[in-house]
Amino acid sequence: MTTTPTSTRHFVLASRPHGAPTNDNFRLETAEVPDLSDGQVLVRNEVMSVDPYMRGRMNDVKSYVPPFQIDAPLEGGAVGEVIASRSDDVAVGSHVVHGLGWREHAVLPAKGATVVDTDIAPASAYLGLLGMPGLTAYVGLTAVAEMREGDTVFISGAAGAVGQVAGQIAKLLGAERVVGSAGSAEKVERLLELGYDAAFNYKEKPVAEGLREVAPDGIDVYFDNVGGDHLEAAISALRLHGRVALCGAVSQYNATEAPAGPRNLFQAIGKGLTLRGFIVGQYPQLAAEYRAKAAGWLAEGRLRGDETFRDGLDGAPQAFIDLLEGANTGKMLVRL
């Protein structure tokens, strides 16, 4: 029988980063575990996610989600076991995915927790292939870029959590050719193992040159995780009526000066391009559809993804810092 703890630990934002975050921007604190109210559950977190979007929440600017507050606990995806419950809907012993990571224990309303089956897939999969990154890839390709059978698809940041899944889903949906960029020879090799038709190391050559080599006849769809020079190169490579899903711009998250915009955006006019930004939370209607398809693909061995782990809550800030520096292949996770 699991004993309910009286205290727990969590990370707060100690200060707002200027440029790349450092460990000094985080502070580990101990807090009492509050008594549960009706409808609440207590979760012992087992694995938590660190994601690029969290960097934006560390800035005090208005965005699609409120910024993290100084001296307040950080948040993020996590999966854990329910060890106490005052809800008829979520039983003790259940595993749930929820949004209160960066802590050892979480008290939250049962309606804010989704029960998951860890017999079908490990807990970590619900933060990666079966979670937000997988759904982001699916939404970006289908609803945003409106990918069609026979398309040539280019994915930047292809070795990351979203990129790995996006390439595989593009092939599963009938893309004729899928190409990607990554930041090392090892990551490029891994993309080929996952079914990418070709990939290049953007640290070895200009992006425009690398993209021409792997997609000499141009591209129809660009799934943008990076922005900057990748977006500029993709605009030049896109064919008539090409589509861009603007998912992220990790190349700019730690920038201290405003980056130059794509210098060739005027090409969108003559080519009739569509550039559409999106947030995965804007497409809740696709979540069940994706989960059903992904579960089948996973069971058939047609959908795979890597996980990069760091161990212990104490290591969560460094895991996040490493993520922004590209140290991960696939999903970056922290085991608690």
Image (tube, helix red, strand yellow):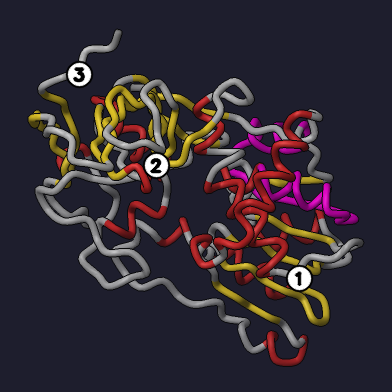
Residue 5 drawn at (x, y percent): 16, 19
Kind of element beneath mark 3: loop
Residue 157 drawn at (x, y percent): 59, 50
How crowded pointer 2 is (Cα within 10 Å; few <14, some 14-19, many 20+) is rated as many
Residue 59 placement, left or right of 328:
left
Disc sitting over residue 153 in the figure: none
Q: Residue at x 75, y 66 (%)?
A: 221
* Quadrant of the frame with the C terminus: top left
Q: Are marks 1 and 2 in contact (CB under 8 Å)?
A: no
Task: Choose the circle earlier in sequence order: 2 or 3.
Answer: 3
Residue denoted by label 1:
237
Residue denoted by label 3:
4
Residue in front for this viewpoint, 128 or 321: 128
Q: Amino acid at mark 2?
A: Ala
Q: Are marks 1 and 3 in contact (CB under 8 Å)?
A: no
Q: Which residues are magenta?
A: 165-193
Residue in front for this viewpoint, 61 or 218: 61
Kind of element beneath mark 2: loop
Q: Amino acid at mark 1?
A: Ala
